[in-house]
């Protein structure tokens, strides 16, 4: 009886325990499916899903009238899809694809910093130090710093790495290069790998015909950058290129590399701005990548979740202030006049040699120059030209051509002289000193200094710098018109270097202009700068009088000289110089940003004195002035000419010129520098071509009927 009772208790206890367990399971199931169902479904989806990046189209760049400067061209690309390409098939698939590419005469993307020599040996590519270091590092091949290119290739071919064997040379090396590119690009379902860009329609046909033998390989539609006017403004628009190791590291440090938490970030196979507008407006142009979510089915198949796709957002469209016709005319005129100055200089120099005067340089060494044209009311860049120049598209596709540009150490065609070259201004500096002297009361509009051709100052016993003429009693107006050095020696001496430089700085000399692309600051001569550049030497009053005529250490960019001229034209108000007119969305319908007119400085000179200097600059272009060729030009022009001593023993003088027009209501300001140009003729030729293009809408074909083809370096 007792046993039966105990047995019943045990059964009931077990039953209760079972009920409790099932009740617990039921409650947990209700919680999972009803209460927390959505949350756990999302977690489940996350654990069995991935996404692939959808690339955003890069924004385009246009000139002020909407003409194309940089556009996107629709192309066919060969892309690897990790969801359909097994790791075991990598090498065979790549080998077959390489043979087909060779058959079609197509190129593929090669970023391995190693090249195969004709002898069959290997060498590191030049200028790839950072990539080579990364390749050897623990992140890639785990090799010592002293490992050779041969060591790197051997490691990549080995069983422990890419396991590339049984393929004939050089295809084994080529397979290794592709594998390296895939590795560096984090090839995965998330990041498809672009094997080749912009292939021909014939190659598309061949690839599609062989698709059954090429698992995971597909032809997709993409875009590549096009530069319709590749020689028009290469230094301004710049270019894009593949990320290098330094850029990748910097982006990684800044948290801008793509990850599971940042699908809009950069991946290693992305392109990035390298120079010019492409670099400086990278954030505006790049756009924002999207993503397409893919879920794994229980059978391991990929299911696209269209409802969870985030579309990419195209980059913004950038409008420049450039006038393409004016830019083309300026380019051609600059090139032709550099060549003309050089040819004329050679003839004159030869005559001087025959006369026994070997060091009287005449412009025979003129090989370069720069021009800037600004809108005098807004300070927008209407033209910016540098010579020698180059063909942007060719430099991106022809390695030998690009290397030849790098080898041009003296002429440096890759350098934008308009913003990065600095030049002694010579007499075009004198209007600044006139403004300072008038405002400070060092002179009045009627003050006269006597010019005998030599500067005689009792404080300078043995120092008598010369003038280019004998001007007798001269006031500030005549001194500017005829460019009298003696007048400005004395004026500079009276003002003093410190006060003089206050006004010069306000006029924008020796300071950056605010332009959106890179520029140098230049040098405004003075005691501090002199100590910096002439160790152990002290500033003297003799240097002050030389600085007053635009010599000494004064050295400015053509862009600064144009902004300085525009500031005078704009009645002493200096605005931010800019080359971006506005930014719109990709459709060009909605304006997102317009560059504001920002006042950087007011020179603090009374209007009557500004008017005096402007009137004197107008007289420069009249009979008796140093630019009298413009006296009968249809538009009234105000200008200042200059010749700047460089090194009399080895080089000709620089020829410089600033101007604004029309005099009554200035619309444009111009600055021109010919390195070692010697003669005013050639800078004034360029100015006249610019005025013809701007005021009379003449084209390159109109002005240069013998042929309007710009010759580029290389």
Image (cartoon, helix red, strand yellow):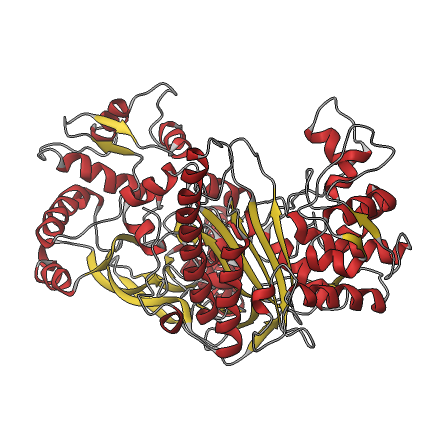
**Residue drawn at (47%, 46%), measured in percent from left and top?**
415
Residue 138 against residue 296 in the figure, above or below: above
Corner quadrant of residue 699: bottom left
Q: How many marks?
A: 0
Q: Is residue 309 left or right of residue 572?
A: left
Question: Measured along the vertical axis of the image, is residue 552 above or below residue 138?
Answer: below
Q: Quadrant of residue 83?
A: bottom left
In front: 474, or 415? 474
Task: Where is residue 246? Give x, y as percent.
Answer: 47, 39
Say which of 393 and 330 sits in front.
330
Residue at image coords 21%, 27%: 158
Q: Give above or below for 140 relative to 284.
A: above
Toward the viewer: 55 or 4?
A: 55
Q: Residue at x 70, y 49 (%)?
A: 511
Horizontal and vertical percent position of residue 363 = 47, 44
Q: Is residue 495 visible?
A: yes
Query: Where residue 279 sits: x, y (%)?
Result: 49, 54
Horizontal relation, residue 280 to residue 393: left or right: right
């Amino acid at each position: 009886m007792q046993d039966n009772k105990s047995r019943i208790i045990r059964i009931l206890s077990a039953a209760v325990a079972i009920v409790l367990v099932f009740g617990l399971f039921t409650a947990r199931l209700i919680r999972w499916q009803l209460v927390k169902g959505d949350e756990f479904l999302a977690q489940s989806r996350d654990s069995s899903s991935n996404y692939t990046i959808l690339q955003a189209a890069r924004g385009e760049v246009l000139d002020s009238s909407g003409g194309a400067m940089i556009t996107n061209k629709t192309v066919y690309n060969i892309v690897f899809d990790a969801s359909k390409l097994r790791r075991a098939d990598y090498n065979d698939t790549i080998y077959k694809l390489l043979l087909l590419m060779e058959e079609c005469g197509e190129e593929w993307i090669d970023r391995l910093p190693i090249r195969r020599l004709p002898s069959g040996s290997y060498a590191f590519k030049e200028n790839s130090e950072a990539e080579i270091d990364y390749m050897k590092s623990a992140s890639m091949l785990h090799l010592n710093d002293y490992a050779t290119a041969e060591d790197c290739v051997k490691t990549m071919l080995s069983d422990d790495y890419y396991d590339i064997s049984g393929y004939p040379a050089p295809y084994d090396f080529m397979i290794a290069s592709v594998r390296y590119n895939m590795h560096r690009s984090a090839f995965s379902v998330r990041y498809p790998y672009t094997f080749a860009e912009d292939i021909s329609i014939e190659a598309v046909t061949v690839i599609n015909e062989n698709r059954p033998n090429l698992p995971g390989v597909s032809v997709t539609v993409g875009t590549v950058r096009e530069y319709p006017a590749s020689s028009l403004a290469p230094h301004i628009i710049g270019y894009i290129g593949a990320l290098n190791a330094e850029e990748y590291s910097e982006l990684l440090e800044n948290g801008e590399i793509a990850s599971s938490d940042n699908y809009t970030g950069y991946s290693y196979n992305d392109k990035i701005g390298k120079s010019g507008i492409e670099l400086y407006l990278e954030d505006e142009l790049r756009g924002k990548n999207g993503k397409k979510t893919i879920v794994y089915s229980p059978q391991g198949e990929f299911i696209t979740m269209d409802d969870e796709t985030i579309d990419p957002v195209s980059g913004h469209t950038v409008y420049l202030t450039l006038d393409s016709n004016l830019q083309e005319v300026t380019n051609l005129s600059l090139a032709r006049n550099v060549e003309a100055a050089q040819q004329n200089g050679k003839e004159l120099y030869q005559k001087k040699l025959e006369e026994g005067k070997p060091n009287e340089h005449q412009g025979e060494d003129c090989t370069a120059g720069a021009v800037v044209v600004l809108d005098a009311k807004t300070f927008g860049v209407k033209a910016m030209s540098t010579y020698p120049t180059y063909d942007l598209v060719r430099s991106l596709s022809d390695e030998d051509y690009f290397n030849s540009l790098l080898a041009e150490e003296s002429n440096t065609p890759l350098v934008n002289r308009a913003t990065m070259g600095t030049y002694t201004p010579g007499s075009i500096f004198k209007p600044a000193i006139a403004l300072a002297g008038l405002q400070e009361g060092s002179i009045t509009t009627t003050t006269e200094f006597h010019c005998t051709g030599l500067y005689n100052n009792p404080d300078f016993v043995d120092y008598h710098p010369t003038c280019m003429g004998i001007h007798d009693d001269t006031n500030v107006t005549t001194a500017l018109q005829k460019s009298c050095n003696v007048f400005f020696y004395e004026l500079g001496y009276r003002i003093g270097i410190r006060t003089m430089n206050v006004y010069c700085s306000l006029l924008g000399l020796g300071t950056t202009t605010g332009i959106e692309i890179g520029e140098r600051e230049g040098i405004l001569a003075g005691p501090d700068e002199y100590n910096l550049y002439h160790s152990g030497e002290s500033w003297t009053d003799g240097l002050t009088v030389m600085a007053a005529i635009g010599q000494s250490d004064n050295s400015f960019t053509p862009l600064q000289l144009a902004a300085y001229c525009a500031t005078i034209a704009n009645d002493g108000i200096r605005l931010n110089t800019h080359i971006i007119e506005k930014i719109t969305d990709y459709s060009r319908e909605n304006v997102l940003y317009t560059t504001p007119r920002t006042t950087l400085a007011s020179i603090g000179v009374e209007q009557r004195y500004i008017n005096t200097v402007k009137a004197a600059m107008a007289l420069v272009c009249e009979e008796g002035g140093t630019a009298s060729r413009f006296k009968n030009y249809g538009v009234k022009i105000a200008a200042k000419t200059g010749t700047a001593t460089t090194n009399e023993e080895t080089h000709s003088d620089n020829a410089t010129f600033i101007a604004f027009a029309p005099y009554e209501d200035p619309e444009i300001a111009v600055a021109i520098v010919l390195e070692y140009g010697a003669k005013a003729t050639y800078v004034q030729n360029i100015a006249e071509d610019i005025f013809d293009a701007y005021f009379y809408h003449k084209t390159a074909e109109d002005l240069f009927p013998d042929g309007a083809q710009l010759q580029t370096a290389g």
